């Protein structure tokens, strides 16, 4: 039953985000693993469209904020405004108080504004003027960022990058998909026709079922072998942390569940590995990220359990 629902959602989203079925499947895996998603690519590729259609398909509240160099933390979280009628300050919630929050072009904002998302992404709450306010459930951040070589971008701090369960790229559409876009069969018209596939209760139920997916000792031993390898390999500046290990396990469990299994295998871990580990690792000779093919070549040195 879950596979049927999963394929229905993939087909709905793929009717708007053309030619990107693999990326759609990864985005859904991230979502049901209770993670946050970073999409890195050039402008005009469809990053924002993917976020919009995902929220609409899930039947969840959606807020979008354009990140700019003059953005302040209060613009994201909210602020206290003096109410002349009561003589008191009243908190006005910012756009972060939603279920799917799109931080568009996050790396065009300063690190101070970027860091305003840290507590929300880690603990699903916002603390303002000493008072803690919970966010809605489910809560999912999708951030888009432009490549760093583009003008006007700021490097995301390591702590911020680590809050994203996955980082994916969309890339240019293939010729068939691009022809449909050029004919006017692209996002705007298709998005208006998209119907809600799920509801809040069903989304939370699936996330709970993902949590209960079994991880065998064989799976956990392989995961630990991967973590140990990154910490001892001369290829990496710094190895993967225990939090990164938990992220890998959650993503592998979600991938397994969405493909009809109540247990995760090393092959599930291999499917999601580059998308979860890639933005957390740096090559010793290169401060930038490691290309996916090169990363998998390095990880191929770790024996896979039979």
Image (tube, rainbow, N blue to C red):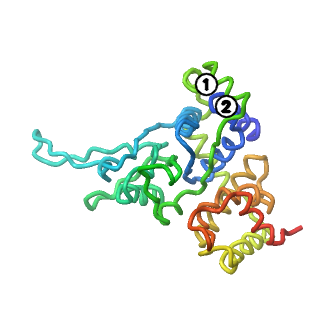
Label 1 SS: loop
Residue holding disc 2 = 18
Q: Residues within 10 Å of mark 2 (few under 14, many from 20)?
A: many
Residue lying at 30% horizontally and 49% vertically, measured from the top left = 70
Q: CA distance from mark 1 to mark 2?
A: 7 Å
Residue holding disc 1 = 186
Give the quarter of the figure containing the C terminus.
bottom right
Residue lying at 75% horizontally and 53% vertically, measured from the top left = 256
Front residue (pair 302, 63): 302
Label 2 SS: loop
Q: In x, y percent, where is residue 229?
A: 72, 76
Residue lying at 33% horizontally and 45% vertically, measured from the top left = 94
Q: Does 136 sit above or below residue 182? A: below
On residue 49, the disc is none
Q: Is residue 83 visible?
A: yes
Q: Residue furthest right?
A: 306
């Amino acid at each position: 039953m879950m596979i049927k629902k999963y394929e229905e959602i993939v087909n709905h989203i793929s009717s708007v985000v053309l030619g990107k079925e693999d990326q759609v499947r990864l985005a859904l895996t991230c979502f049901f693993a209770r993670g946050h998603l970073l999409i890195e690519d050039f402008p005009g590729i469809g990053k924002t469209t993917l976020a919009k259609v995902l929220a609409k398909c899930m039947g969840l509240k959606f807020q979008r904020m354009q990140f700019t160099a003059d953005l302040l933390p209060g613009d994201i979280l909210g602020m206290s405004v003096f109410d002349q009628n009561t003589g008191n300050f009243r908190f006005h919630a910012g756009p972060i108080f939603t279920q799917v929050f799109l931080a568009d072009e996050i790396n065009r904002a300063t690190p101070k504004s970027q860091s305003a998302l840290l507590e929300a992404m880690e603990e699903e709450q916002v603390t303002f003027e000493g008072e803690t306010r919970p966010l809605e459930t489910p809560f999912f951040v999708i951030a888009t960022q432009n490549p760093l070589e583009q003008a006007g971008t700021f490097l995301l701090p390591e702590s911020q990058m680590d809050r994203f369960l996955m980082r994916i790229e969309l890339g240019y559409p293939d010729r068939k998909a691009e022809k449909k876009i050029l004919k006017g069969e692209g996002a705007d018209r298709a998005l208006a026709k998209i119907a809600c596939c799920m509801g809040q209760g069903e989304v939370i139920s699936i996330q709970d079922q993902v949590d209960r997916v079994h991880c065998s000792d064989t799976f956990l031993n392989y995961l630990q072998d991967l973590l140990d390898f990154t910490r001892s390999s001369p290829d990496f500046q710094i190895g993967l942390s225990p939090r990164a290990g938990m992220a890998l396990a959650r993503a592998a469990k979600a991938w397994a569940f969405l493909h009809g299994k109540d247990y995760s295998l090393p092959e599930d871990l291999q499917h999601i590995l580059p998308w979860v580990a890639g933005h957390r690792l740096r090559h010793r000779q290169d401060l930038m990220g490691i290309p996916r093919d090169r990363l998998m070549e390095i990880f191929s040195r770790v024996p896979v359990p039979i």
